[in-house]
Image (cartoon, rainbow, N blue to C red):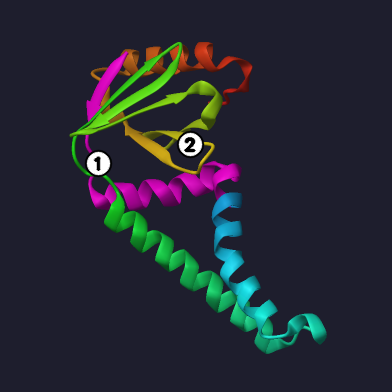
Amino acid sequence: MEIRYSLTRAEIFLSFLQAMAKSPKLLAKVLVFCLLPGAVGVTVSGVLTRRLTFGDAVSIILWMIGAFCFMVLWLFIRGKTAERTLSVSEAGISTTIGKLRGEIAWGKIADVKEAGRHILVIGSSGNAFFIPDRAFSSPDQKMKFISDVREWRGSRLIL
């Protein structure tokens, strides 16, 4: 099955927030990414040789907030808004945006979920596709898409 769609930057941002709420795996990856700068910063400052202070905890939290803001800004800037062609088959997902092309085997897909008015496809690398309902010509086509993906991914798929 082949679908075509494009996303606005606002949709990318809102879908990302919605996806974190729907996917514990994505939320865990985001939290780990955000925690790392604070943990490294506090460790470098010498917390290993003394007790963790309130200031250290505040520093970690501020680093986490900063890392999250950086990630959201990066997503907002780097999110692809051009028309995407996405095809799914027994082999996996093929995608094209302009001259960029990629293929992802089902084994490299960590999760596929419905997230509000989008279908969320999360790769094991953390990259994700947000497929809006409007990408499908009808609710039946969307259900066929979900059914095909379930079949190809096997029992690992939870929608």
Amino acid identity at mark 1: Leu
Q: Which residue is mark 1?
A: 7
Left or right: where does residue 10 sit relative to residue 91?
left
Q: Is residue 15 magenta?
A: yes
Indicate whether 1 appears above or below 97.
Answer: above
**Label 2 crowd (10 A; few <14 / some 14-19 / many >=20):** many
Indicate whether 44 appears above or below 139.
Answer: below
Indicate whether 19 appears above or below 55.
Answer: above
Instruction: First in sequence, mark 2 or 1: give its number.
Output: 1
- Magenta-drawn segment: 1-27
Q: Horizontal and vertical percent for residue 56?
A: 67, 84
Task: Tell me the quarter of the picture where residue 102 sits.
Answer: top left
Q: Which residue is mark 2?
A: 122
Which residue sits at x=31%, y=29%? Answer: 133
Measure the alpha-carbon separation of dots 2 and 1: 16 Å
Which residue sits at x=33%, y=13%? Answer: 140
Which residue sits at x=26%, y=21%? Answer: 3
- Total numbered labels: 2
Q: Horizontal and vertical percent for residue 98?
A: 18, 34
Mark 1 falls on what kind of element? loop
Amino acid identity at mark 2: Ile
Residue 69 seen in the current view: yes
Mark 2 falls on what kind of element? strand
Which label sits in the foreground, 2 or 1? 2
Q: Horizontal and vertical percent for residue 153?
A: 54, 17
**Label 1 crowd (10 A; few <14 / some 14-19 / many >=20):** some
Q: Horizontal and vertical percent for residue 34?
A: 55, 64
Q: Main secondary structure of the magenta part?
A: helix
Q: Is residue 61 magenta?
A: no
Indicate whether 78 appears above or below 23.
Answer: below
